[in-house]
Every structure is written in C-alpha cells, then in structure tokens.
Amino acid sequence: MKQAILYVFSGTGNTWAVAGYYQKALSSTFQTERVAITVDGGHMPNPQPYDLVALGFPVHAFNAPEIVVRFAKVLPASKKPCFLFTTSGEGVRLNDVSTRLPARILEKKGYRVLSVRHYVMPYNIIFRHSDAMVRQMVLYAKALVPLHASDVLKENKETLRYPLWERVLSFLFRIEWPFCRIEGLMMHADPHTCTLCKACVARCPMHGISVKNKRIHFSSACCICLRCSLDCPQNAISLGLLNGWKVNGPYPLETLAADKALPFPVSPKELFFTKRYFSECDETLLMHGIDPASLPERI
C-alpha cells in the first residue's frame, strides 16, 4: 500500500482533528501517518519514503504560524505531490492567503502542490462557540474532507490564486510573529490557582514553558497557539495583552458531533463571519449529491 504523511501544527487540537479526517478519507489508498510539528521539526520523518505529503496548520492573523513557515523551510526537497489544509474560527476569504508562503516554499523545493482547503473550526480565542455551532463546524468538516481527499487521490491540480491586496494585508499582519515573543514574556500562571501539574510545560510545541522556583515560567519562545491556556485544568494562565479574549476548556469535538439533541443547523444569528463559508460548503455538498440537512445522520 502507498504511504502518506500529514505534517500538522495544531495549537488546541482543531487542525489535528481535521488531519484525522484526512487520515480516514485516504485510508483506502494510503497508509497515512499524522505527525505533530514542534519547534525541533527538523528531526521529524523525512518525506522521501512517502508517496503523498500534506501540511496542515491553523490560520494566525491571515498567515501561517511562524513555526510552520520555519518547518517548511527545513523540510527536505522532494518531487512528491502535496496538499495543504488550514483551520480558523471564521470563514472570511482572507484566511485563504495563509497558504501562499508555505505553498511557495514547498513548490521551490520541488513539491507538486495540488490544492489547498480551509475549514472553519472552533475559536480558541476571542469568544467561545456554542456547542451547536461547534457540532455544525465538525459535521461540515467531516463531510468536506473526503471530497477533497478524492480530488487529491486523482492528483487534480488546482490553480492557486492570491489577489495582490490579500498578499499585502497578509504581509502586514505578519507583525504577529515578533508580537508572539513579546506576548510570551507577558504570560504568567496565577500562583494561587496553579497546581504545578505541568500540563502546559509538557504540551508547549515551542518548549517555551518551564518550572522555576516552583512557579510556571513563560519565555519569549511563544507562537500564541494558546494550547497552554485553553487546556489548563485550573484556568490559571493569564494571556497578558490578550487576556480579555481568553477562552478556557477544550472542545469535545467528537462528543458534540454525535450529540443529536443539539440543533442543526444553528440559528442564522450564530453564523457571524461564517455565513459565506457555510453557504459555499452547501453548494459544494449539493454539487456532489449530498444534502447538507443529512449531515447529522452521516457520522
């Protein structure tokens, strides 16, 4: 059987979950491996033995996180077919430009970038989505991933277009990269609430959190993935300048997806910046003979 590798950076688990949907969708043709990108990504599996390569990551300020760009730069050159997928908490079209830089890097290394896809998944900052909204996001992702995987299996190559204004705006928002380092230094754990369980230390993809003098210490090695804060069992971590937007507690994606007591689809007032996204998703599903209303029954 052919082999595929999915290199995935996932702050709080959304992109990792979508990678799992790809893993399942490709399983008829590929023995697929998911590997998590960390700051020492140069030590990850070489893509050479694999027949298909994928890169998945969350969108940060209309860009790929810096850790993903660095990983793409150290990934060995190859002529293998490749696809990219991203996740974010809103469906604005500007998120699509986040794939431009890593796609260009991979193409210069010889990879045949076939296509890219973006999926709306729950926010880990600004506000917490309702359980029904999370369920809708997951159900759509589960339905759409196999459709893209089918195109990937056929090696259908799509033309990637990034309008100039999107590229300029994306470049300006890349100021988030140095901001991450400042933000990391401003983060701290409340010593009265923190139990020193060290979950944040173990899970930090940048290896930027440690314990010093019996207190959690944050360094400038931060990419604002927010895994430490979202997953803190005591809600003890302050996000510095971003603390007013903090969301705590992971989303039980699969549990919510299976909960048929939740309304589907959600009320239009909950769509916020996702109305266009779900509308375009509906068009895609209908084009493939899938009734969007049937999604809760398909899992």
Image (spheres, helix red, strand yellow):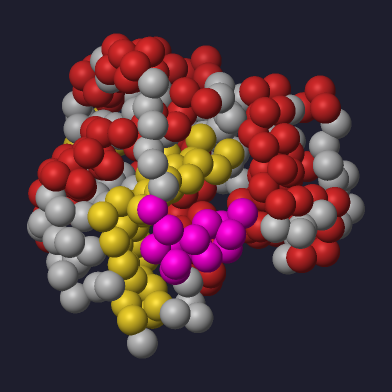
Query: What kind of secondary structure does the magenta stretch mostly adopt?
Result: helix
Q: Position of residue 285 (x, y in %)?
A: 71, 52
In the picture, the quarter occupied by the C terminus is: bottom right
Q: Is residue 154 magenta?
A: yes
Say which residue appears at 18% left-offset and 41% top-offset.
105
Compared across the picture, whether 297 is left or right of 229 comes to: right
Q: Residue 27, how many percent across, how many down? A: 48, 77
- Indicate the position of residue 134 as horizontal and vertical percent values: 69, 43
Displayed quadrant of residue 239:
top left
Residue 144 seen in the current view: yes
Question: 44 above or below 141?
Answer: below
Residue 252 place in picture, x, y as percent = 63, 52
The residue positioned 33% from the left and 71% from the top of the image is 4
Q: Residue at left 23%, top 64%?
A: 80
Q: Is residue 74 left or right of residue 166?
A: left
180 in magenta: no
Location of residue 283 with respect to 271 vertically, above or below: below
Residue at screen point 50% across, 41% down: 118
What range of the chain is rendered magenta?
144-157
Q: Is residue 275 above or below residue 39?
A: above
Decide: is 295 above or below 206. Answer: below
Q: Give the number of marks.
A: 0
